[in-house]
Image (cartoon, coloured by chain):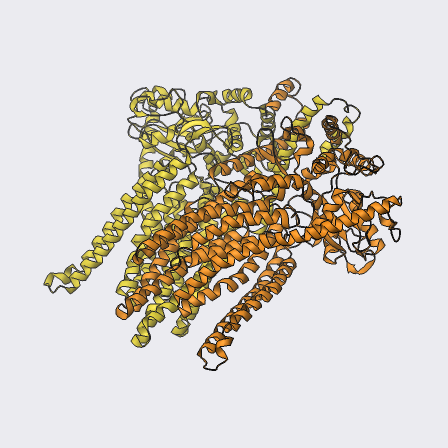
Chain colours: A orange, B yellow
């Protein structure tokens, strides 16, 4: 696909594209508005003069290439509701293209040829200058020439360009997409926008993210970034196509963003770590039952050490990725609302919402509601067991035939409950109004995990501790770990692949048909006119109907949306539970988990690259609520394993030994293990030494800079006050100043 | 005591005292060495011209006041071994007075009249400029005119002086003492100092703290700061003399430093918090035994919430005191050793010692040793119980008379063990070579607390869970809480007071006698000559023998040394253990603890002000290892109370109910309580919102300053590169620069 390559290069023409005067205006606007833009522009022009200023875009299409406007790469596609009001569309497009001072985002927009069934489809891009400026605003971290990671600043541009690197390659495609999304999401309602034009009932308040409101009311059907086929192919070769190779984490990060890269790093780390309990599990099978408590101790140590080392690793990555400094006081997420006010930290105008309100909502409403749901799920689970028990004990002839019914109904119910609970959790978390995306994710995941825990593990607890049937428990675990996980992998990767194959046949056919049709229409010298003049889009350049971008956008628009890493983490979390909670009863669990995960990595990679829409890059500094969830699971595993051991011993020894003494022994073992866990937790520092030092150095440097800044300011004041000693010493001082 | 007041004022004459040329030299030296000293000197002189430049120092003595040199206030007294070699003394004094470039501390030294029995006694002070410079170097935090707390810088001097405040009052006496100690302790051995002159076996290596080595080898007998009687009297009136008034925390901090102030804040906070379990305890006495588990739950919630809120309060204080940013990478403590190298954080030359070596020492040597000692103490405790048991069961006629013997011997043994263990713990912690004082304290306290725990609580555990004698437990607790604590308070405050009274009678008499003797000798026109010329002290000014400073120094030198806050915290820790560990058996414990603490606060205050030598101010950001120790005690209290409840229930119900079920019930209760504790721990943030925001703001500001600094540097580079656009826009740029 050589055109894709060319498309990437054509980016360099972004500044100079002829089709509209958008960028030139932007440039002028910023010259007036921002300090130092002269130098920046100059630097940029210096860089660009080295490259081709104009690229002819699409050589595949022979017809009329010279008359076409050269359009920049399309980063994000917005599909608008076909039935939208004209005024609304006009308003929306104006906001996206508009000047900053008018509340606009200053982005480049171009449209697809109008198709009444699909509605308006807009492609969003930005000028090179815009990218760099927003990169500085968003405090994107970049590695400079010396390999030090720091915030990108336009004035330091040269510092971030190792020899041979072009300005165009500085920001990855994922970063550009993030930048454009950031700008789109930050189009906020002004004081005069009290409702969406054309839709008086859809109220707006000052500072609300307009794009999010439109998405909420379905005025925008979809918004998604486009894949970069060339990069994707390269990535895939190193990733899902090499079964035992190391995953290309850095490339994953550059393509999919930090969130996805962290998931795959975690998955790899976890799988490697699982080799330890796998070996221990096999050993345990060989040795006598008396040795089981020792394995218990080993497992506890493993779980704790694994999670602590992961925390260190995660902090290391966060440092390298420049996300370690993220706090809950960072820039708010798009949907965060509140009255606009001066931010206490940065002094910018941002929505303000008191934290205590969020806390009250969380503890007084969400928390009880979640508990209620968990209780409900628990009762439903119990009922299914009771009904099954009842059926087993009844002598009626129909009872045997109805025996599988309760579990089937229960499974179906769980599925339905999950569906609604997810909506509830999302709604509640949104309503709690957390400031940052990380906080939002953490609280949403916490709610979901609690419910999933009840659904996935309560039945096992019931079997283990109430029915006390170890064979049933073992069978259940084997089923879950071997069969269900295999099915899951097939469902995730192979099934969609088959579907995709068939679908692509269909779309290929459609595409072919469309081409013939277009050829025919082209013969009639023009594309059929739009059913009515779509005035809001008049000034906006249009991509040609056979443009690669248009085809990609259409194809990818049909793909499923990759909904965060939540489901993938959940899968791992449940597996982790199966492995650690009952390891004393079913020690080969770790082996099956390893086998599954080796496939899982590839299946997940495959599905991300080829089956889903390209997800938006998302910055994270850790795995969020999952860290705590895994830790609590580790603590629970101590309880369950000690409980299981205790029960087994009691059953084997029979009533010869006093019950109370056995229980006491195991309670002591359990407390000892909990103590070991706590000690390990304290003894292993969260951050590696080098990260701590590097952070302290950065902190020290910036503190010194602040001191110097204040010193210089004060020196000016003091100089004005005490003019006596000046003159004779000024030269000496200047020398010393340059040293400082 | 009006002379004390005048003494404080005489400080202002520090720069201009006529007795030596030390300060003028210093000034010159710094002019060459440090940037901006011209302005600083100027500013200082400006300030000082407003005040009297010369204060006549001691009006009480009528004789020869005009011939005396005016000496500044004495901040630290150093008592030197009478048998020290002359070369050593010479070397030491040179180091203290010497220039920085020669490895000296540039301090002002004056001596007491020589007394062969006492040896040389030196008083240390510093010039005003020195104080301010070191204050900047030590990054002392001060509140500026706007009430914002930030690092003091000399160039910002005016910013830190609200109208009416003099430069002299900027630094508190405690801060000045800290500064002088800092300078003394930071006299480090140079490459050529391979041993202490005069003592070839006492080796030195480069970078070692000379004063500490001398203290270690007893070449310096004592080093202590002096009390400020006027301030002390004012403080006492508000503190130990007002039984129910709020403690004057800010004044305590200014006088005794952060460490002591934090202890008293904690003590006050803890006592207030104890009112809750006190009320609950009385309620529990009134209600039936069935309600006890509910009180257990309340107590757990109380313990956790109390400790979490204390953490918040402590962080608040640390922020206000400017100590919240202290980390283990700060400036090393005086005894930290290692090869000299460039510090990775600050880039200064400092001793470097790899952290892993400390860790290896800690985990491979100290930790097993401490465990061994704990085990030993435990075995000794058990033996005493066994011997007592044996004596009780033997019918021999002597056995009854010997019955108290085991516990008496045990008590004595514990005392001796404690003495040696303390030395061991100090030695081990020193040997581990922790970088900062906070780390050192934390690890030392951890070691000590573990051992004290065995000594103080193991016997109670034995009574509660092995002998299972609840009445004995209750009696034991009552004895400890009522009688022992009362004795303790008497021992701490009243006994020394009585002793002090009699001692002061004796010293008064001696003083009177000395005065007469001096009068007589004065009549013979001169003080008796020194037995031999003490050449090293030739150039050093001498205080007159009837100088207040000399009398104070002598008096305070005889007082006991206040050895950190360790013993005071330990007392509270043990009391806390008595209150929470067995609250279900002895609910009035909290009441006695409150009664004791109200007295304890005054007794501790009294002893600090009047009985001990003035302690050196010490910066801390939290209560260190005690936070964890109290938290673990809280967790343990869940275990013990559930255990006690379980046992009591079993005994009451008799063998009617199955033993196993009871135990299970209480194991469940215990786990539930542990869960509640964990949730509370997660739900309560460590720092109050306003502290988090203030820290984030400061962080943001310094980040911005670093960015600006880099931007300016780069602008210069860019300007050189692209000179084209300059000239016409320069004015506009400058305007924008000032906005930035």
Count how many numbered circles sit on residues in the image: 0
Q: Is residue B405 above or below residue A524?
A: below
Measured from the top left, where is residue A436 in percent x and y? 63, 50
Judging depth in this view, the residue of A500 and B472 nearest the camera is A500
Q: Residue furthest left?
A: B397
State which quadrant residue B166 falls in: top right
The residue lying at 42 percent from left, 53 percent from top is B601
Q: Residue furthest bottom?
A: A396
In screen coordinates, is B153 left or right of A538? left
Judging depth in this view, the residue of B470 and B369 nearest the camera is B369
- Quadrant (top left/top right/bottom left/bottom right) for the C terminus of chain A: top right
Q: Is residue B180 above or below residue A493?
A: above
State which quadrant residue A466 falls in: bottom left
Measured from the top left, where is residue A316 in percent x and y? 52, 40
Judging depth in this view, the residue of A218 and B522 nearest the camera is A218
The residue lying at 42 percent from left, 52 percent from top is B602
In screen coordinates, is B729 left or right of A389? right
Measured from the top left, where is residue A624 in percent x and y? 55, 51
- Quadrant (top left/top right/bottom left/bottom right) for the N terminus of chain A: top right
Residue B603 seen in this snapshot: no
Residue A152 seen in this snapshot: yes
Judging depth in this view, the residue of A406 and B618 nearest the camera is A406
The residue lying at 48 percent from left, 82 percent from top is A396
In screen coordinates, is B353 left or right of A439? left
Measured from the top left, where is residue A68 in percent x and y? 83, 38
């Amino acid at each position: 696909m050589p055109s894709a390559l060319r498309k990437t290069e054509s980016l360099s023409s972004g500044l100079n594209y002829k089709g509209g005067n958008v960028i030139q205006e932007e440039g002028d606007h910023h010259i007036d508005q921002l300090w130092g833009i002269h130098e920046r522009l100059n630097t940029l022009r210096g860089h660009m003069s080295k490259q081709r200023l104009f690229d002819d875009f699409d050589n595949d299409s022979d017809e009329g290439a010279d008359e076409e406007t050269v359009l920049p790469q399309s980063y994000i596609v917005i599909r608008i509701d076909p039935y939208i009001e004209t005024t609304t569309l006009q308003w929306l497009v104006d906001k996206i293209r508009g000047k900053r001072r008018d509340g606009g985002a200053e982005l480049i927009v171009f449209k697809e040829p109008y198709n009444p069934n699909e509605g308006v489809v807009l492609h969003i891009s930005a000028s090179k200058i815009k990218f760099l400026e927003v990169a500085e605003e968003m405090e994107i971290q970049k590695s400079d020439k010396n390999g030090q990671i720091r915030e990108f600043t336009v004035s330091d541009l040269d510092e971030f360009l190792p020899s041979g690197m072009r300005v165009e390659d500085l920001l990855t495609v994922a970063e550009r997409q993030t930048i454009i999304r950031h700008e789109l999401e930050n189009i906020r309602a002004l004081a005069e926008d009290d409702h969406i034009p054309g839709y008086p009932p859809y109220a707006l308040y000052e500072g609300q993210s307009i794009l999010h409101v439109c998405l909420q009311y379905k005025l925008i059907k979809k918004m998604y970034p486009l894949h970069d086929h060339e990069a994707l192919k390269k990535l895939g070769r190193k990733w899902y196509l090499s079964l035992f190779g190391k995953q290309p984490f850095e490339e994953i990060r550059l393509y999919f963003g930090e969130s996805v890269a962290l998931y795959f790093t975690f998955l790899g780390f976890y799988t490697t770590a699982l080799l330890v309990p796998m070996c221990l599990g096999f050993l345990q099978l060989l040795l006598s039952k008396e040795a089981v408590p020792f394995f218990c101790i080993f497992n506890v140590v493993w779980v704790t050490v694994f999670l602590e080392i992961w925390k260190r690793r995660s902090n290391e990555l966060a440092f390298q990725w420049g996300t370690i400094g993220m706090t809950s006081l960072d820039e708010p997420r798009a949907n965060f609302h509140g009255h606009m006010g001066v931010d206490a930290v940065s002094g910018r105008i941002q929505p303000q919402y008191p934290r205590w309100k969020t806390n009250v909502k969380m503890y007084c409403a969400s928390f009880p509601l979640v508990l209620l749901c968990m209780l409900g799920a628990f009762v439903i689970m119990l009922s299914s067991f009771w009904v099954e028990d009842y059926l087993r004990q009844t002598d009626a002839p129909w009872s045997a035939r109805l025996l599988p019914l309760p579990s089937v109904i229960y499974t179906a119910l769980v599925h339905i409950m999950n569906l609604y609970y997810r909506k509830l959790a999302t709604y509640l978390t949104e309503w709690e109004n957390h400031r940052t995306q990380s906080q939002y994710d953490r609280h949403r995941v916490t709610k979901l995990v609690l419910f999933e825990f009840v659904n996935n593990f309560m039945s096992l607890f019931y079997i283990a501790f109430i029915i006390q049937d170890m064979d049933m428990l073992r069978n259940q675990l084997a089923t879950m770990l071997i069969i269900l996980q295999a099915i899951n992998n097939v469902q995730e990767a192979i099934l969609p692949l088959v579907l995709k194959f068939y679908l692509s046949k269909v779309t290929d056919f459609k595409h072919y048909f469309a081409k013939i049709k277009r050829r025919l229409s082209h013969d009639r010298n023009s594309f059929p006119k739009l059913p009515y003049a779509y005035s809001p889009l008049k000034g906006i350049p249009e991509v040609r109907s056979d443009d690669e971008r248009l085809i990609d956008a259409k194809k990818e628009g049909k793909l499923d949306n990759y909904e965060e890493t939540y489901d993938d983490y959940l899968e791992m979390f449940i597996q982790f539970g199966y492995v650690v909670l009952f390891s004393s009863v079913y020690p080969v669990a770790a082996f099956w988990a390893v086998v599954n995960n080796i496939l899982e990595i590839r299946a997940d990679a495959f599905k991300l690259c080829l089956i889903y829409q390209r997800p938006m890059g998302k910055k994270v500094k850790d795995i969020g609520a999952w860290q705590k969830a895994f830790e609590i699971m580790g603590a629970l595993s101590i309880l369950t394993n000690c409980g299981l051991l205790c029960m087994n011993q009691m059953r084997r020894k029979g009533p010869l030994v006093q019950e109370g003494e056995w229980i006491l022994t195991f309670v002591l073992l359990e407390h000892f293990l909990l103590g070991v866990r706590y000690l390990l937790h304290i003894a292993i520092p969260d951050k590696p030494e080098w990260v701590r030092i590097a952070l302290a150095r950065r902190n020290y440097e910036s503190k010194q800079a602040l001191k110097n800044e204040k010193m210089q300011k004060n020196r000016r004041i003091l100089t004005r006050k005490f003019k006596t000693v000046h003159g004779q010493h000024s030269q000496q001082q200047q020398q010393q100043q340059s040293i400082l």
